[in-house]
Amino acid sequence: MKTEVFGTALIAIIAGMYLGLVKIATMIAIALVIIGYAGKSKKTKSKEKKPSQNTAEETVLHPVVYEDAGEPPNLYPEDGSIKIYPDGKEEKLTAQDMAKSTEAITKATVKGIKKLID
């Protein structure tokens, strides 16, 4: 039995006597002792003979050679343009979209000019 299990059982008994719970402390101690004995594993002898240490084979190490494959391939187009369609399809340009973009550009230009003047 391990020393930890025996020590835990002894502490449980002493604490039980101090608190006046001798029956409960004794049951805990007995349970810990049973767990300690149940946790032991029996060693069985295997019928197979293990190879003796005298017949050690020599290990041959082979070097690993890495070749440089060059630059990795480009994942994106050379010009760097990528088209993204949020809904999965291309939207046609309409006159209304052109008017909105012209309005946004005009507002940004006016704000920039006002900041320069002030």
Image (tube, grey):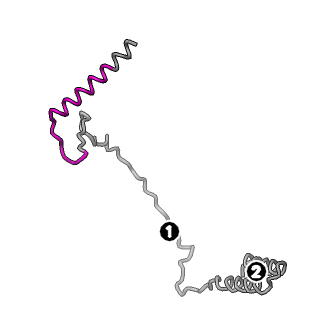
- Callout in the foreground (2, 1): 2
Q: Position of residue 94 (x, y in %)?
A: 15, 35
Q: Amino acid at mark 2?
A: Ala
Quarter-of-image position of residue 41: bottom right
Check disc 1 and report the residue beneath it.
57
Which span of residues is magenta-colored? 86-110
Asked if residue 66 is positioned above or below residue 101 in the image, the reply reads below
* Mark pair 2, 1: CA separation: 51 Å
Q: Position of residue 79 (x, y in %)?
A: 24, 33
Q: Position of residue 45 (x, y in %)?
A: 59, 86
- Asked if residue 24 lies left or right of residue 77, the reply is right
Check disc 2 and report the residue beneath it.
9
Image point (17%, 33%), residue name: 96
Q: Amino acid at mark 1?
A: Glu
Image point (29%, 24%), residue name: 107
Query: Which is more toward the observer, 108 or 64?
Result: 108
Q: Position of residue 33 (x, y in %)?
A: 72, 84
Query: Which is more toward the observer, 92 or 81?
Result: 92
Q: Secondary structure at mark 1?
A: loop
Q: Quadrant of the N terminus?
A: bottom right
Query: Which is more toward the observer, 66 or 21?
Result: 21
Asked if residue 116 is positioned above or below residue 55 in the image, the reply reads above
